[in-house]
Amino acid sequence: MKTLLLPLCLLGLTACSGKPPTPTAAAQPAVAASSRVATPWDAMKADEQRARDVQKIVDKQAEDQRKQIEAQTQ
């Protein structure tokens, strides 16, 4: 057991010696700037816009129906 402990410690120390890590953090901000991160409010905004669109359709249909009723009563 002691014979395996010494080589493992040496291997761990040599693996962690002075070699700087590759700079992957520099590439991430450029990618993050071009892609948008979804937020919890995106779904609510989409639902709100869909509701506005539906309301416009309902208002237009109601206006058309009102015009038809007025045309029949004249």
Image (cartoon, helix red, strand yellow):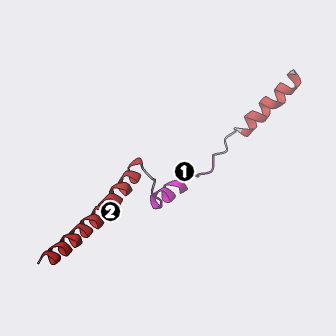
Picture quarter containing residue 46?
bottom left
* Local SS, label 1: loop
**Residue 70 x, y percent position in the rendering:** 14, 74
Picture quarter containing residue 13?
top right
Total count of labels: 2
Boundaries of the magenta span: 21-36
Viewport quadrant of the C terminus = bottom left
What type is the residue that disc 1 sits on?
Ala
Is 26 situated above or below 10? below
Query: Which residue: 81% across, 31% down?
Result: 8
Query: Farthest residue in the front direction?
Result: 73
Query: Which is nearer the N-term, disc 1 or disc 2?
Result: 1
**Residue 52 x, y percent position in the rendering:** 29, 60
Is 35 situated above or below 15? below
In front: 69, or 1? 69
Is 34 situated above or below 22? below
> Does 32 sit left or right of 23 as displayed?
left
**Residue 31 x, y percent position in the rendering:** 51, 59
What type is the residue that disc 2 sits on?
Val
In front: 2, or 70? 70
Residue 25's disc number: 1
